[in-house]
Amino acid sequence: MVRGEPYVDDSSEVARRVLEELGHEVEHLGLVGDEILGIRAKLAQALAEGYDVVAVIGGTGISRRDVSVEAVRPLLEKEIEGVGEIFRLESYKRIGFHAALSRCLAGVISGSIILALPGSPEAVETALKLIGPELPHMVHVARI
């Protein structure tokens, strides 16, 4: 990004495209800074509005500003560890060891599926092509 130019959220647009191609309805996109409280506030808003699935995109790496996992994990009622494991395995096949630096996360809060996905458009596409087809089943099971 060049100073003075507006931020373009390519990853969220990739998420929208992939999910819509899979037949899901995407109702909301929003931007939040790299702050734990801001992420949690937006997540709480989405849950209060009754979203089945909430995806937090970006902030899953290992830099100091990557705080999405720290924002989301303590709030999860259940963590779905296999989602991150499978994502990293698939990513490893494509990009090598660098995939190990991703902290892709999934879990459940109040019957909603919560995803914390890496921020690159390629990673979002990989993750949602894996997870997307299973979302209806995941939501169903989370609400039993």
Image: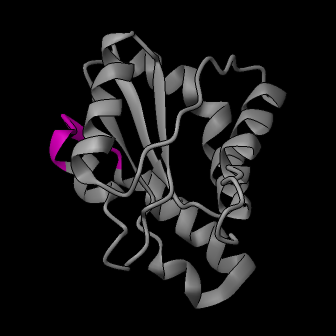
Q: Nearer the viewer, residue 67 or 138?
A: 67
Residue 103 screen position, x and y as percent: 41, 66
Does the image show residue 127? yes
Q: Residue furthest front?
A: 4
- Image quadrant in which you'd find residue 107: top left
Q: Nearer the viewer, residue 108 or 62?
A: 62
In the rendered image, the vertical position of residue 99 relative to residue 67, given as above or below: below
Residue 51 screen position, x and y as percent: 45, 16
Residue at the (31%, 77%) spot, across then down: 64
Q: Residue furthest right?
A: 21
Range drawn in magenta: 74-80
User: Which colour style is shown?
Assistant: one colour
Residue 46 screen position, x and y as percent: 39, 21
Does the image show residue 144? no
Q: Quadrant of the C terminus?
A: top left
Q: Is 90 positioned to the left or the right of 60 in the image?
A: right
Residue at the (78%, 28%) spot, across then down: 22
